[in-house]
Image (spheres, rainbow, N blue to C red):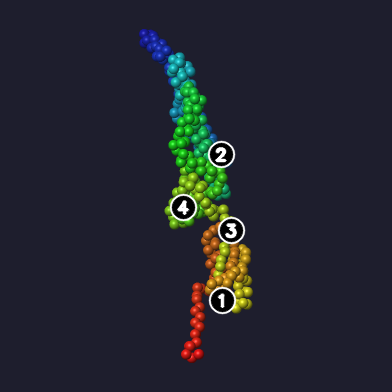
Amino acid sequence: MEWFAEEYADLLKVEFYGNTAVEWAAAVGIAVAVFSALKIMQAIGLEQIKKLAGKARLSQANLFLDTLKQTKFLVLLLISLFIGSHGLTLPENAQTLIRSAAIIALLMQAGFWSVSLLNGWLEHYRATKLAKDPAAVTSMTAMGFIARLGIWAAILLLILDNLGIDVTALVAGLGIGGIAVALAVQNILSDLFASLTIVLDKPFVVGDFLILGPEHLGNVENIGLKTTRLRSLSGEQIIVSNSDLLAARVRNYGRMFERRIPVIIGVTYQTPREKLEKIPQIIRAAIEAQDKTRFDRAHFMRFGDFSLDFEYVYYVKSANYNDYMDANQAINLYIHEIFEKEGIEFAYPTQSLFVEKIPDRKTA
């Protein structure tokens, strides 16, 4: 038994890469303990935030809950190994490798947490502001992309700096290379900057009804980094590059608060003057009888080729096209009914042929 104990003690004193078995076992034990403690802390944190979110119904609690769930297993493992390795005597290269791996893992984890917080906040902002301010939602979507790009760019630079790479020289080199890339993809960059212009200047937002020239019209469905998508009245999707969209003359009906309607109607030349004098009052009564209309004017406009023309103008106090058509139909029916009662006839293209009889020369 004593012989076995002596052999076992000698085995524990055997060194592996400059450390005894006892030291290796202690390092592994510390790493396991640290890893277990970190996992327990994560579980407790998740449970406490869940309770807080359930009681107070705080969106911020749910935001932190989703963020904490982004903690990566590999990151906790590398941190645990780094802490456990402090009790070992390792070559400088190995220590540098372990330290660099742990720092890179922490930086990556910071990136995951930051992006998760940003995405959660943007989603909350979109849900609360979409109905009230679509323009703000559009702006935040583009700004969110830029923010995520900035976060990962900063993480990448910090990782390269930790690896001993000269970041200053790299940034300068990227600047020179960026010029060449910009020249090669100038069309894409043109659309990208056009997208930022749309986001910042807000000539239209998601939901607006646009008319682009004589052929393309529809509701804005999405404003992307390169293209804007419209849903046409007939159902198909219209895709327009952002640079072309900004170069075009766009009619935005989403910013229209009321619709101005000019109308010309004609009556026959045989209409008596006292009836002509009543027509502006009839038209005004027809317009004022509607709920969503506002009368502007009605006048005997001109002597036409085959009719006496009246022009009237009114406003529909709604941007909705169906509201306009309903009001227009009601006004037309009202005018038609009163004209029938008053015996006023609508004019239509006619020609009168007058034949003059020439005296016979023999009779003369």
Is tag 2's residue or tag 1's residue first in the polypeptide sequence? 2
Residue 217: percent from the left, percent from the top?
A: 48, 54
Q: Nearer the viewer, residue 343 or 118?
A: 343
Residue type at the position of mark 1 = Tyr
Give the foreground label among 2 and 4. 4
Residue type at the position of mark 3 = Glu
Q: Nearer the viewer, residue 216 or 12?
A: 216
Residue 269, numbered label: 1
Give the foreground label among 1 and 4. 1
Residue 72, numbered label: none
Residue 110 in the figure: left or right of residue 278: left
Residue 180: percent from the left, percent from the top?
A: 45, 33
Q: Is residue 107 visible?
A: no
Residue 32 in the figure: left or right of residue 263: left
Residue 279 in the figure: left or right of residue 104: right
Is tag 1's residue or tag 4's residue first in the polypeptide sequence? 4
Look at 49% across and 30% down and name the residue there.
Answer: 175
Q: Nearer the viewer, residue 348 or 337?
A: 348
Residue type at the position of mark 2 = Gln
Residue type at the position of mark 4 = Arg
Residue 258, numbered label: 3
Q: Which residue is mark 2?
A: 60
Residue 89: percent from the left, percent from the top?
A: 45, 14
How packed is label 2: few (under 14 Cα within 10 Å), some, or many (20 or more)? some
Q: Is residue 279 visible?
A: yes
Is tag 2's residue or tag 4's residue first in the polypeptide sequence? 2
